Image (cartoon, helix red, strand yellow):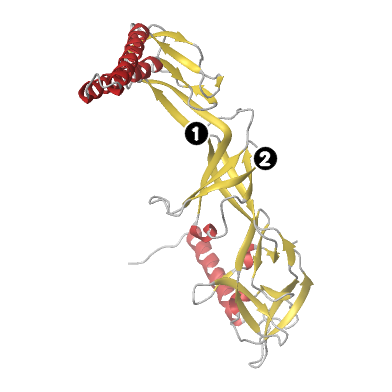
């Protein structure tokens, strides 16, 4: 069966043939020796060329940054110790209180009268005991009456103390200086013993708390000076607590910074951070892109020694900044390999080109 080709078929065949010829010609044509971009083969004994930059260490102050939040140094939810109706609210939420201030008053009912009566009984028992003691001294009374009188006096005193405690419980007082939050009762409400009444929070000092990883734990100690940052405002203080046990969820160690705050103007739960300056150290600043991982899993850098031999040094991260990281653990000064480090191995001799002064300051 014969196939008839139209004009479109001929055009397609011509174009396909031209493409095939062009592709084949690329493999057959030799590179132009005058073309500077053409690859130049190296002899078997030539050295691999790398680029280096020379760095010198500078003194810096490392710091540890801990992210966390603000909190009160003391917090107490006050509860009723006796039952009664709320008859007075002397301090309201948001107000400052001093230790001992009466915040809420409950109806004392007949407690004052009962206390007065019991105190009178105590005085009566004391007079009776004194009289019996005198009669015994005169030989007119036996010891049994003395023991009985002492027991009656002790019982009366116990009743008086119990009533005094109950009467005191009708006045709910601030256990320490602070600010009131979260009142649970209103005027006229009846509360039972154990019912929550109001919270007292102490913000002088206030606390910034967060967690540090294991690698930073041994560089911290209680009393160490620190700077707290809240809403871009700085606060000077010191570390008051460092946990000795890691939390099970994050494996971090809790740290608390204490900040003096006479004004008591602070809130709990604000996003905050703690910055702790460490002793001065010598370090160089590099781009993180230069870091390598060797076969042993160590993070470090490749550099060239005086004999143009590639060396590897494990490094310690001292401080991280937005435009680079400060590291230690290298010779000073040092020629770091900036181009070609992935193609050379430790102990290999190399050729150096374009050695320039350090660019990362």
Label 1: how many Cα within 10 Å (few below 14, some 14–19, many 20+):
some
Residues under numbered marks 1 and 2 in contact, where contact means CB atoms less than 8 Å apart: no
Q: Quadrant of the N terminus?
A: bottom left
Label 2: how many Cα within 10 Å (few below 14, some 14–19, many 20+):
few
Above or below — where is 281 with respect to 33?
above
Left-right relation of 128 to 41: left
Tag in front: 1 or 2: 1
| Viewer-closest of 282 and 89 | 89
Left-right relation of 361 to 256: right
The residue at which mark 2 appears reads as 234
- x 70%, y 85%: residue: 308
- x 78%, y 72%: residue: 356
Where does residue 225 sit, x and y in percent of width and height?
64, 49
| Viewer-closest of 131 and 358 | 131
Left-right relation of 77 to 330: left
Q: Which quadrant would residue 178 be assigned to in this image? A: top right
The residue at which mark 1 appears reads as 74
Where does residue 108 sit, x and y in percent of width and height?
37, 9
Residue 206 has which mark?
Answer: none
Residue 190: tell me if it is visible: no
Where does residue 297 sit, x and y in percent of width and height?
49, 72
**Secondary structure category for the residue under label 2:** strand
- x 75%, y 79%: residue: 353
**Secondary structure category for the residue under label 1:** strand
Mark 1 → mark 2, Cα distance in angstroms: 22 Å
> Mark 1 or 2 closer to N-term?
1
Q: Which quadrant would residue 64 be assigned to in this image? A: bottom right
Residue 44: tell me if it is visible: yes
- x 53%, y 62%: residue: 11
| Viewer-closest of 131 and 150 | 131
| Residue, far right | 357
Left-right relation of 88 to 283: left
């Amino acid at each position: 069966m014969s196939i008839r080709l139209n004009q479109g078929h001929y055009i397609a065949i011509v174009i396909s043939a031209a493409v095939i010829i062009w592709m084949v010609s690329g493999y057959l044509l030799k590179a132009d020796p005058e073309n500077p971009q053409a690859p130049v083969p190296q002899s078997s004994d030539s050295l691999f060329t790398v680029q280096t930059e020379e760095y010198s260490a500078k003194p810096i102050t490392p710091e540890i940054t801990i992210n966390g939040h603000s909190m009160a140094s003391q917090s107490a939810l006050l509860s009723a110790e006796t039952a009664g109706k709320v008859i007075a609210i002397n301090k309201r939420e948001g107000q400052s209180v001093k230790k001992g201030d009466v915040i809420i008053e409950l109806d004392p009912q007949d407690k004052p009268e009962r206390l007065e009566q019991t105190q009178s009984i105590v005085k009566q028992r004391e007079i009776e005991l004194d009289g019996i003691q005198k009669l015994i001294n005169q030989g007119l009374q036996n010891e049994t009456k003395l023991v009985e009188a002492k027991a009656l006096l002790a019982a009366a005193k116990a009743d008086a103390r119990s009533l005094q405690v109950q009467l005191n419980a009708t006045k709910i007082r601030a256990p320490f200086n602070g600010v009131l939050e979260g009142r649970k009762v209103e005027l006229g409400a009846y509360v039972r013993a154990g019912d929550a009444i109001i919270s007292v929070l102490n913000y002088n000092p206030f606390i910034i708390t967060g967690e540090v990883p294991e690698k930073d734990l041994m560089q911290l100690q209680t009393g160490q000076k620190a700077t707290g940052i809240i809403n871009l405002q700085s606060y000077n203080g010191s570390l008051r607590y460092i946990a000795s046990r890691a939390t099970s969820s994050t494996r971090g160690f809790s740290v608390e910074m204490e900040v003096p705050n006479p004004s008591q103007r602070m809130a709990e739960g604000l996003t905050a951070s703690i910055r702790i300056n460490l002793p001065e150290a010598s370090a160089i600043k590099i781009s993180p892109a230069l870091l390598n991982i060797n076969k042993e899993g160590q993070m470090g850098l490749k550099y060239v020694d005086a004999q143009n031999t590639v060396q590897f040094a494990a490094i310690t991260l001292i401080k991280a900044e937005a435009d680079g990281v400060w590291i230690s653990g290298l010779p000073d000064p040092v020629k770091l390999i900036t181009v070609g480090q992935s193609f050379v191995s430790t102990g290999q001799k190399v050729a150096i080109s374009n050695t320039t002064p350090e660019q990362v300051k």
